[in-house]
Amino acid sequence: MRKFLDEGAQVMIADINGEGAARLAGELNAFACAVDVSDAASVAGMAQAAEKTFGPPDIVVNNAGVTHLPQPLEGVSEADFDRVIAVNCKSVYLTARAFVPAMKGRGSGVILNVASTAGVSPRPQLNWYNASKGWMITATRAMAVELAPMGIRVNAINPVAGETPLLKSFMGEDTPEMRAKFLATIPMGRFSTPRDMGNAAAFLCSDEAAMITGVCMEVDGGRCI
């Protein structure tokens, strides 16, 4: 987000935490919108708010994501499974339904999905989260091949675990031992940062990547090699 603002983009921060989004937007000179990306009416409202604020967006980033706690696949509750699928998968469908028609009408647009290395090289006991990110990778490629003739590019980034609120959920507990265990799987020896993600995302959404679509780029310090 900060990288996009640095590059001169107008940015709408859309988050289920409306107060937090508004507070951050105020600090960064951006716009804010409260949205539940798993709810069709809420996403439609976000699309209307974006169009009213600055017109149909040129770029849509699907960055919402949740996980369940590490556990055997049969132990994940149905409620947790439904939440993972709704936020990680259904949201991409809903934003596509809300924003793609205007992109088609304009003959241009970029969609960036934030998937995960978990969809490429699954970690044990993050089973249904892994599956949701594998879905997002396939959805990215399917969207890209369908929308390319309309001038719309669709790519994804696959981050490795980073310093985000999800890190503790991935590990189950945030201890030096668990951090060391996770870091041991990353050849570069560090977690990802928001700056790492922002730089990759801004490139894929820029005109410099005009010939790139359907790519799911690992930003992972070598984890998936």
Image (tube, rainbow, N blue to C red):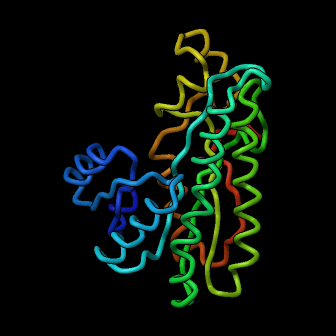
Residue 198: x and y, percent?
47, 53
From the viewer's perspective, tell me whether residue 80 is left or right of residue 72.
Answer: left
- Of residues 29 and 3, the one drawn nearer to the viewer in this rendering: 29
Residue 95: x and y, percent?
54, 65
Image quarter of the C terminus:
top right
Residue 118: x and y, percent?
71, 39
Q: Which residue does the image show at 60% across and 78% down from the upper left?
A: 210
Q: Which residue does the image show at 61% across and 79% down from the upper left?
A: 152
Q: How many marks?
A: 0
Asked if residue 200 is positioned above or below residue 187 in the image, the reply reads below
Q: Which residue does the image show at 69% across and 81% down from the upper left?
A: 148
Q: Which residue does the image show at 51% across and 74% down from the upper left?
A: 99
Residue 145: x and y, percent?
76, 75
- Of residues 156 and 225, the one drawn nearer to the viewer in this rendering: 156
Query: Which quadrant of the figure has residue 67?
Result: top right
Query: Which quadrant of the figure has residue 188?
Result: top right
Image quarter of the N terminus:
bottom left
- Of residues 212 and 166, the one drawn nearer to the viewer in this rendering: 166
